[in-house]
Image (cartoon, grey):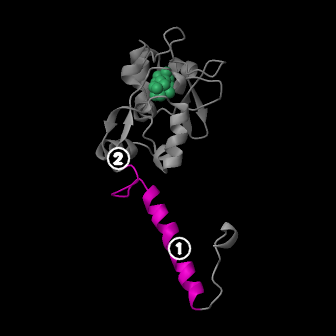
Amino acid sequence: MPNGKPIKPTSPLVGPIWETRLTQIMKNKAIQNDPSNESPWYSKGLSFECTQCGDCCSGPGEGYVWVTPEEIVALAAAIGMSEQQEEFERKFTRQVGELTSLVEYSDGDCIFLDPKSRTCSVYEVRPVQCRTWPFWKSNVKSPRAWSQAAKNCPGCNQGRLYSLAEIKTSLEKDNGDF
Ligand code: SF4
Ligand code: SF4
């Protein structure tokens, strides 16, 4: 391999073999990154333990916390607004296309992040998106994506080891919006 660069074969016999090998490598990579794969790169599990830093619930950037109608009902009940469902939606949610997200404070913090304790004030009924972090499809699609998630979340690669089955259960709840 002179100059450190791979040489693409030019022989008509070797060329197709090169292409086939390349296709196979790409295919294997795609299979590895597919969460439905029986033995993904995280098949031995991944460690995670929340440090309660609150970073994933806060700004400064804009984010989305998607909520379903059922989650909205549960959240409204949790803060004593069962009878004021419409008011709850007006005050705490916003439409983003066909989806509904929780609103944020002007600094980007989630509206349900307690400003003093930096903890979730609706923890028991927090949306699935919050419950399943960090085991989202986007975070486990590759080791690199997981490392990126870990840069933003100090709980990744710490504490309890989540099994492949547990991670898959979490991924099944991610419909691709997270
Ligand atoms: S960023 Fe990670 S460690 Fe911090 S609160 Fe969120 S989940 Fe927990
Ligand atoms: S609902 Fe709770 S856990 Fe989810 S982003 Fe808001 S403060 Fe964080």
- The residue lying furthest to the front in this view is 2
Q: Vertically, is 28 above or below 56?
A: below
- The residue lying furthest to the bottom in this view is 12
Left or right of 49 on screen, residue 25 = right
Q: Nearer the viewer, mark 2 or mark 1?
A: 1
Where is residue 172? Give x, y as percent: 37, 46
Q: Look at 45% across and 30% down and name the residue there.
A: 130
Residue position for label 1: 23
Q: Vertically, is 29 above or below 77?
A: below
Say what amino acid the circle numbered 1 marks: Thr
Residue position for label 2: 168
Where is residue 68? Give x, y as percent: 45, 34
> Does the magenta-highlighted stretch encompass residue 138?
no
Q: 39 and 9: which one is in front?
A: 9
How many C-alpha atoms fall within 10 Å of the one at disc 2: few (<14), some, or many (≥20)? many
Q: Give whichever of discs 2 and 1 has the lower sequence position.
A: 1
